[in-house]
Amino acid sequence: PENVSAAVVFEGCLRVDGLDGAASTMGNNRAHLLFRKALGVLTEGMCGYVLIEDELSDAMENIYKAATDPSLPVFEIDEQLSVLSGRLDANLFQTLSGMVSDFKQKYGDGSQPVAGLRFPASKVEQLISDYSQSIKDPAESVHFSSLTTPLREAAAPYIKSSDAEVVGSERALNSFLQILRDWISVERWFCNDISYADAVENLRKANKENSSSVLNICRSHAQLKATSKIILRIIETIADGSRVESVTGKSPSVVAGAAGLDDALPCLSDIASMGGKAYAEVALAARKLLLHESLHSIEDRKSRVSQAAQELKNAAEKQIPKEVQHLLDENVPLSDVFFSLLNASADAQEEIALAELYARKMYRTYSLRDVKHLVDQRTLKFSFTTKQTKSVFSSTTPMTSMSDLSRALSRSSSLSNLDMTKNESESDLTSLQKSDNIPPNTVRTVLTKIVGKVEDLKDPAAFENVLQSFPQFTMSASKCEAGPINILYFVVQQEVNGTLEEMDAMSKCLQETLEPFHDLLKQADIRRVAFFVQQKDGGDVGQFSPPVVFTYRAQSGFKEDSLFRNIEPSFVYQLDLGRLAKNFSVKRVGVHQTTTSHVHMYKATPRTSALANDKKANKSARVFGRAVSFVDDFSSASCERTLVDAMNAFDLCGSSGEDNHLFMNLESDYEKVTTDPVELEQTFVSILKRHGERVARLGIAEVEIRVLCCVAEGCPPISLRLVASNPTGYVLVMNTYVEAADETGTKGSFKLIGGTKANLACSGDSSWEGMDVTSPYPLTRPFDAQRKAALKASDTLYCYDLPALFEAAVEKQWNDASSKGGIEGGIRAASKPLMVMYTSELVVQKKKGDGSKSWTMKDYLNGDLELVQMSRGAGANDVGMVAWLMILKTIEYPEGRQVILIANDITHKAGSFGTREDVVFKLASEYARERRIPRLYVAANSGARIGLAEGVKKAFKVAFKDPLKPENGFNFIYVTKDDYERFGSSKKEIIAEPVTLDGEEVYKVTDIIGAEPDLGVENLKGSGLIAGETSSAYNDIFTMTIVLGRTVGIGAYLVRLGQRTIQKADTSPIILTGYQALNKLMGVDVYSTNDQLGGPGIMYSNGVSHLVAPDHLQAVSSAIEWLSFVPSVRNGLLPITDIRGIDEIERPIEFTPTAGIPYDPRLLLTGGENDDGVWQSGFFDKGSFTESLSGWAKSVVVGRARLGGIPMGVVATENRTAEAIKPADPADVKGAESITQEAGCVWFPNSAYKTAQAINDFRTEDLPLMIFANWRGFSGGQRDMFDEVLKYGSLIVDAFVAYEQPIFVFIPPFAEIRGGAWVVLDASINASVMEMYATSGSARGGVLEANGAASVKYRTKDLLSTMHRLDDTLKSLDKKLSESTSDDEKKTIKQSINEREQSLIPVYEQIAVQFCELHDTPGRMEAVGVIEKSIEWKEARSFFFWRLRRKLAEFDFRKKIQEASSVGSGFEGMTAIGASALMKTWFIGTPGMTEDMWNADKAVLSWMAQCNQDLERKLLGLRKQVVIQEVVQAMTAGGATAEIGTAGIVEGICQVYQTMSMDDKEKLKKMLKEAIDL
């Protein structure tokens, strides 16, 4: 082996020059060939073939070279023209050829560019069009058009290319768009986090007959990284081509001037919507381009702003022109066009008008006065005051709801003015408590000075002259006692680059410029100096760069804080940046301005000090978006625009990751704008729900909205905070706070308005209640670590978030019902409870002891444990199994129904089953069985726990055979004498025997017990405990398993033992062993995911999973829908719903199948649209049918539906051919997928098992059962007999025998039951509950089908006999034959008879079939008593509704009769049939009732309602009779039995007598005295 050279991966370049024609002749360098070759390289790369390094760049460069070559259209047009020689009109061909020749002559070899040279492609199109119009003959015109189509198509792209430099831009764009479309068609199968296995399976299903297409798509996807690079280059190219103005010094885009650029938008939209990490970069690039395309034209804005400035310039003093006010109200962005317009201004007056426009925009929430234009000084001066301060509630004000908020606003005593106003935009933002706040009515002066460059400010005289405009500087006004109040702005027309280095240098320069003037600034009472400096344009999609803003505050010694750089000073407070400073190191990463908002983006990295306090926190940086929006109203549209702008900003800054935060501050002119806080909250909830998917994709964990508003005219303004999060990814949690004042009245804190549903539902999210309004943002939110652990472990949810999902599912049920409209919708909307769910956790603890003490399985076995209801916080569990008692206020039970929910905590030891987990599961399940309420189990686990004795593991030693060569093996494991005394003799952690090793006494370990609990086989004992419990629970109560994560081993068995299963579509496999272990066992990586072993593709297709849901919430919603069919307690009353406004009870069934034509049997149940699109109703209530087990055994349909609001189980026959697919096992190299065709109307092994399983499920759900029977029998072929069809068919009978609710077997129109199928459906199997019916006229039933019966029982001799009996011709021939004496004549007659017989056989065969079929009609079935009666199909709904109501009432009452008749042991209880017979006797004995009326369902129901009291008396009488017979039997039995019985009765009377009151004793004495004549 050592002589064999190891294979080495080749990492060089595989390209060989000249192999593919790269070393080509001059002809191959022609533009059209170069273009096609480069395009071919891209196409091959997109098909999944590896592109060698630099090939992509070379190809893009060659496309650009070809597209900018003037000869490209000539060669492409000439190529098409050359094949038309002799086929076109000679003159036309000569003209076109001449154009091509002339251009080629001018172009030469292309080495010398000719200015303005461009081939007139439009002239080619015009010549062809003119000639076409000159043709008179229509046929010739059509021929000419088809002949010249390729030529026109070749010329068309060059007509649409408007850029003179890039003649082939449209040609290149069309090619790029085709690449984009092809890529989308490939990747749409894989995006949005679809697993590869699922994607391939979906591909195979969609391309059953085209396997090569599947291969091509998978090959292309395999090179996703490479194809994404090509797509990115194309998107960048399209973006460059979309620019309004080309960037100086940069070549135009290859698609510049293409007319079809807008055609790229659909492709870009599709790419932008792609989800998944692999598509993040491409999707982001597409979204950025779409955002830029949606921006308003910058030229339009410049025009509007310029016009507004002109009107302001010409306006009279103290008047604001309408155009200016409109511009401010619409919040049109000014900053990016400000310097462009300023530099283009005609005079200083226009400059100052622009400055005033900018100032009015910045100070729109303040009251401005005394605006002055100092034109000769290029200066704007004005004064302002703050508006009314916001009112703040006292922290003691009760605030349990929005109603309390409204009431509190009407009481002035509840409100105080928090001594803090918006003028603190430049204050220390880490603290609200200020001792120098500026009084709100203080008049403050602002000066804006326009200068050409920074050097202009260094002249002391000029600077002092600027300050002369401040009244405090000239001593004409006194300084404010609270501190500096005035503001100085400088607009500097000197350009600065946007790089960090240059901006830092400019900041330092400005700071040095201000240093000599600090005293003068203090004398002028200047609070801050801000510089607006012109920034050089970056040329980004035709946009101008906004100014760079540097702010220097008096309180910081006129030094700049870079955190606030580029923020307009008046916005600083609104951004609430102080809450970021303590826990994060913040860096600004961008700003996004629109007509609705200013969005500032910050990259926040957790500080080391903060991480030290929160060690589990996410250490990676996250993005904080801070949006300020000035809105005219709080309408849904305006609020939604702000949210969309903020999300766009997140997209543009390329935010990826998690824990991002969005803060939106909605400012309004609250003196004019009022809003209802309730409506505001509902508005934001609906908006965030609409955009929830995008918010999650951007990694925004929390959205915080601040609103300053008035709730009514004349009311003081209040500040609301709405904090929304979606910790589960499915349930939006919205908490609303009002800013309240503390006891001092100087500090703000958050006060929660009412309790939140999420808190009551144990979702585990904390509240901001009582927190300071300036509290820093934490690094993590409560339970983030657990949620991330659950997501990482099995893509599932933290168990304490599950109740919130159930609450959301019930809310959705109410909302869906309310949205249906009509009477029913109105009833549902009015009756919806405020809280739809309450939960309490079920905690295991020791009996009569301290609940905090730990317990073990031994305590359970000793009977020392109990299950206690407890309201404790989320995450308080120390066991990996959690249980709740939930009260769900569903539509069926608006007062509430109890449900037990059990769930694995996958964050606790990977969700494994230890003995303590088994005890919790066992006790919670028993709790449900005791109360006979449904038990739901949410599975996400890793099977039975496996552990090792860690203490022993660290101490044991090994006795090697040769210590110098340990690789030779070992003899045994041992511990030293000291370790043995520590582990063995005292703690019994090991069992060992003393041996001598190298002259030293050691202890050879024979058994390891371990000190830690749950290390091994004891966990399997616990698994057996809960397996048996689940099996018992299935028979006793409603059980269901919702699989939301992987479930392994015992977890998988619990799924099956609980039977009803809802499985999440991905990453929720039901397995016995993980795929990694199987791969290791086989030594080959056969399986790639657990889903291949137990995903829905396996478990849904084999009937383990009843339903599949796409996500967690839909799975829980499906469970709630399933529960809606089930009584609140086992053997309880059915949940009957009101169907008014949805359907009618007394209506005909409109859908009727056509004889001989296969149809979807679900249409019988649900109805559907006919060929004209008209709805035709079905048997059950509209929209009530829910199918289950639809992935398995498709020749039978099972599910649940409602008939007149009454829930029922349904089994129906599929009459069409179905496919049974058995997947190929990757572990079997020779294995292949097998597809078996299963004929309709036949029971196969799988469909028979499915039928039996469904019946058992319906039985334990207490549902009446409706079977639409259309079976010709069981499949009896060799394969199906081997696959145990006989066994599974007999299970159907077993299921019927155990059934206790009404069963109706109904043969629908044109259906039949034959042979063995009838045997397992006959009503005599369980006559107490089963009844059979058939459709009048068209239903059939018999041993054999009519054709088969005729072939057996009406053979040819019988046909001939019938012919000779009925046919006159044959009768005449028979007579002639009998009378004839001549042999020749007889021979002739016989031949005639034979000919006649042969001609009649076809029709008489039909007659025979018809005769046999008449033995199978509903009339005969009813006559011989095998069915109750035949029913018209159209009337079947009404009949069975009343029949079902009657049977339910009858069964309920006969159960009472049976209970009354089963007192004691000596009297045999009455059977169900006997109870019905007794009930019938009572019915007939009622005056006015007859035996015939017993079958009239409405009459029986009416009798039971009217004679209810009489029936109750009869029940008491029956019970009395049974007691009498019991006593008589006990006292009259022979021998000692009678003596003992008599003594027992007397002793029993004595014991009861001792417990009676004196009155009761006297009554008893009197009764005995009168009865036995004492």
Image (tube, rainbow, N blue to C red):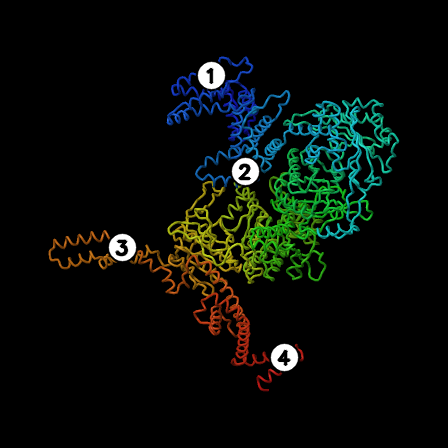
Q: Quadrant of residue 619?
A: top right
Q: Residue at x 60, y 82 (%)?
A: 1567
Q: Nearer the viewer, residue 1084 or 1009?
A: 1084
Expressed as whole percent of the image width and height from the top left, the position of residue 1118 reads 56, 51
Looking at the image, tell me whether mark 3 or mark 4 is earlier in sequence order: 3
Expressed as whole percent of the image width and height from the top left, the position of residue 587 reads 72, 33
Looking at the image, tell me whether mark 3 or mark 1 is earlier in sequence order: 1
Looking at the image, tell me whether mark 3 or mark 2 is earlier in sequence order: 2
What amino acid type is highlighted by mark number 1?
Answer: Val
Q: Which residue is mark 2?
A: 190
Q: Nearer the viewer, mark 3 or mark 4?
A: 3
Looking at the image, tell me whether mark 2 or mark 4 is earlier in sequence order: 2
Q: Residues within 10 Å of mark 3 (few under 14, many from 20)?
A: some
The quadrant of the image that shows the C terminus is: bottom right
What amino acid type is highlighted by mark number 4?
Answer: Cys
Q: Residue furthest left?
A: 1382
Q: Which mark is residue 1404?
A: 3
Local secondary structure at mark 2: loop
Q: Which residue is mark 1?
A: 100
Q: CA distance from mark 1 to mark 4?
A: 127 Å
Q: Nearer the viewer, residue 738 or 267?
A: 738
Q: Residues within 10 Å of mark 1 (few under 14, many from 20)?
A: many
Q: Nearer the viewer, mark 3 or mark 2?
A: 3
User: Looking at the picture, does residue 1355 appear above or below residue 239?
Assistant: below
User: Looking at the picture, does residue 1422 appear above or below residue 1523?
Assistant: above
Q: Which mark is residue 355?
A: none
Q: Residue at x 71, y 36 (%)?
A: 604
Q: Which residue is mark 4?
A: 1550
Q: Residue at x 44, y 37 (%)?
A: 210
